[in-house]
Image (cartoon, helix red, strand yellow):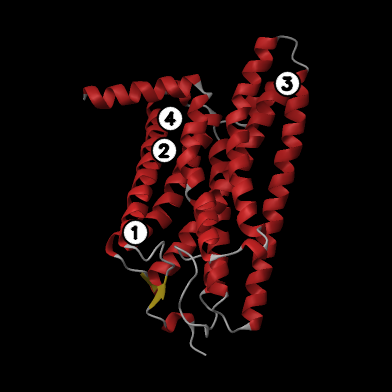
Amino acid sequence: MPNSSSMAQFLLLAFSDRRELQLLHFWLFLGISLAALLGNGLILSAVACDQHLHTPRDFFLLHLSLTDLGCICTTVPKAMHNSLWGTTTIPYTGCVSQVFSFVFFMSSEFSLLTIMCYDRYVAICKPLHYGTLLGSRACPHMAAAAWASGFLNALLHTANTFSLPLCQGNALGQFFCEIPHILKLSCSHSGYLRETGLLGVSACFCFGCFIFIVFSYVQIFRAVLRIPSEQGRHKAFSTCLPHLAVVSLFISTGTFACMKPPSISSPSMDLIVSILYSVVPPALNPLIYSLRNQELKDAIRKTMTGYLSG
C-alpha cells in the first residue's frame, strides 16, 4: 500500500472536455476572483485608513476580508491555470498546501463570524458593557484565538489526511484538493476512522458556534423589538442584517455540501456545490456588508476616489 507522500501528483476533476467550455470557466473564475479581490481589498483599505472605521465591528470585518481573500486565493488560481492550459494535475506538495490553507481559512472565517455575532450581541443587548467586553485588548485576543483555532484545525486534518496510505489511484473527483475526496482513495480503515473522528469534532465545534449564533440573535431580536422608536429599531436591525446574511450564506452552502443526498450526487453536481460554498461567499461578502453600512460605503468611495485621483 503506497503512502500518499510517495505520489508525485494528484488528478483534479476537469470542468469540461471541450476547449470552449474550459476557456469559459477560466473567464468566469477570473471575473469572480477579481470581484472578490477588489471588494475585499477595498474593505481592507477603507478600514485600515479611515479613523471612523476603527471600531470592534470593523476590526473583525477586516479579518473576515482576509479570510475571504485566503479562500479565493487557495482554490481559484489553480483551477484557472488548469482550465487555461487544459491540464488536471496538481503536485503532491500543492495538494497538501491547498488542503491546509482551505481548512485554515474556512475554520478561521467561521470562528470570526461567531465572534462578530458576539460583538453585535454585546452592542445591542449590553451596550453599557461594550467598552469593557470589547476593548482594545479583547478584540486582538479574540481575533488571534480565531486564527489559532483555524491553524490547529487545519494542522490536525492535514497531518492525518496525508499520513494515510492510498490504494485507489490518485484521481480526485473535485476541482481542488478536498479532504472527503482524498479519503475515498485511502485503504486504511483505522486512518479513515481517525479522520472521521476529527471531522466529527470539527462538526461539533461548528454546531456549538451555530447554536451560539442562533441564541444570540434570539436575544438581539428581543432587545431590538423593545426599542421604542422605529428609527432606533431600524438602525439596530441594519447593523445586524449584513452579518446575518453572511452567516446564512456560509452555513447554508456548507451544510448543503456536507449533507446533500447521495441520490443527487454526481461529478457536475459536486462541482456546482463546491463552488457554492468555497467561491461564492468570499466574493459576495464584501457586497453584502457594504450594502447596509453607510459609513463603510462612504469610506470605500473615499478610498476609490483617492486611488483614481492619485
Name which residue lies at 57% across and 68% down: 180
Q: Which circle's residue, 4 or 3, is located before the other in the chain?
A: 4
Q: Can you see residue 305?
A: yes
Q: Residues within 10 Å of mark 4 (few under 14, many from 20)?
A: many
Q: Which circle's residue, 3 or 1, is located before the other in the chain?
A: 1
Q: Is residue 87 above or below residue 152?
A: below
Quarter of the image for residue 51 reads top left
Q: Is residue 274 above or below residue 117?
A: below
In-front residue for pair 264/175: 264
Three-letter code, disc 2: Asn
Q: Which circle's residue, 2 or 3, is located before the other in the chain?
A: 2
Q: Which residue is mark 3?
A: 224
Q: Which mark is residue 149?
A: none
Give SS at disc 1.
helix
Name which residue lies at 73% across and 35% down: 216
Left or right: where 135 falls relative to 50: right
Between the residue at mark 1 and the residue at mark 2, the CA separation in whole angstroms equals 27 Å
Q: Which residue is mark 1?
A: 22
Name which residue lies at 57% across and 43% down: 112
Q: Residues within 10 Å of mark 1 (few under 14, many from 20)?
A: many
Q: Is residue 210 above or below residue 220?
A: below
Q: Residues within 10 Å of mark 3 (few under 14, many from 20)?
A: many
Q: Are marks 4 and 1 in contact (CB under 8 Å)?
A: no
Left or right: where 289 falls relative to 117: left
Q: Which residue is mark 4?
A: 47
Q: Which residue is mark 2?
A: 40
Give SS at disc 2.
helix
Q: Position of residue 22 (x, y in %)?
A: 34, 59
Three-letter code, disc 4: Val
Q: Residue furthest left?
A: 310
Between the residue at mark 2 and the residue at mark 3, the CA separation in whole angstroms equals 30 Å
